[in-house]
Amino acid sequence: MPQKPFDLALLFTGHMIDLPGRAEPRFPEHAEPAAWLAIRSAIEQARNRNKGRMVGIASGARGGDLLFHEACRLFGIERRMVLPFPPDVFIETSVAGIPNGGWETKFADNWSSLQSGEREILLKAKDSSGYAMCNHRMIALAQELSNAYELVALWDGKAGDGPGGTAEHVEMLRRMGGRVEIIDTKLLLRRAAAN
């Protein structure tokens, strides 16, 4: 069997920063600093458990995805980004919407820092099936690149708003026997409220 390029693929799934006016807060903007620290800590723990070469794999939505990419860059970890549809449409659906949040700039910076072979676009146009396809592709990519894979999930433990969400990604990895590290957004909210 040929040698795979990485010893560990670390996947990420997680909630987007809530749009203004979301009825039930899941990941409000004020919890971003706590999420950043928790994601960095999860990556550091994965590095300590696995001393070989690591690749980080995530999509590029505002909130958890982009925080994960930025933390991987901080640690010098190679990355792959998978989008369900082209960047301009993805920005409209999954990045923009937070006034003065700077997420569009963070997305553009992370996307452009990757080589063409390190980023993928699955569909040519917006389609609701794209999000589930994205989860499946990230897992397939992890299997192509490494014999071992783990998932970090920034998640409130509830069912998602639609197909292809965090809950579905967590369940898929668990069924496959992969390690899943949950960053509980309910705890993050309590920490953020205490500060």
Image (cartoon, rainbow, N blue to C red):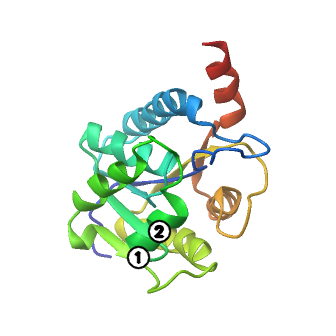
Q: Which mark is residue 26?
A: none
Using the image, determine if residue 19 lies above or below residue 140.
Answer: above
For disc 1, the marked residue is: 86
Real-space CA distance between mark 2 and mark 1, rounded to the nearest whole angstrom: 6 Å
Q: Position of residue 21 (x, y in %)?
A: 71, 44
Hey, which residue is sitting farthest top in the picture? Answer: 195
Q: Residue furthest bottom?
A: 124
Asked if labels 1 and 2 touch by Cβ distance under 8 angstroms, the answer is: yes
Res 141 visible:
no
Q: Residues within 10 Å of mark 2 (few under 14, many from 20)?
A: some
Q: Is residue 186 above or below residue 82?
A: above
**Location of the C terminus (image quadrant):** top right
**Residue 175 falls in which quadrant of the image?**
bottom right
Name the residue: 42% across, 48% down: 103
Q: Residue at x 38, y 42 (%)?
A: 50
Q: Secondary structure at mark 2?
A: helix
The residue sitting at 49% across, 51% down in the picture is 62
For mark 1, does the 10 Å Cα neighbourhood hold few (<14), some (14 to 19), or many (20 or more) residues?
A: some
Q: Which residue is found at the position 56% from the left and 68% from the top?
A: 135
Tell which of 13 and 50 is nearer to you: 13
Image quadrant holding the N terminus, namely bottom left
Q: Dividing the picture into quarters, in which one does residue 29 lie?
A: top right
Q: Nearer the viewer, residue 43 or 30?
A: 30
Amino acid type at mark 2:
Phe
Which residue bears the numbered disc 2? 90
Q: Is residue 45 left or right of residue 31?
A: left
x and y, in percent, of residue 140 in the image: 48, 73
Q: Note whether 47 is above or below 174 in the view shown.
A: above
Give residue 85's position: percent from left, percent from top.
46, 77
Q: Secondary structure at mark 1?
A: loop
Count up the numbered dots. 2
Residue 99 in percent (x, y) is at 50, 44
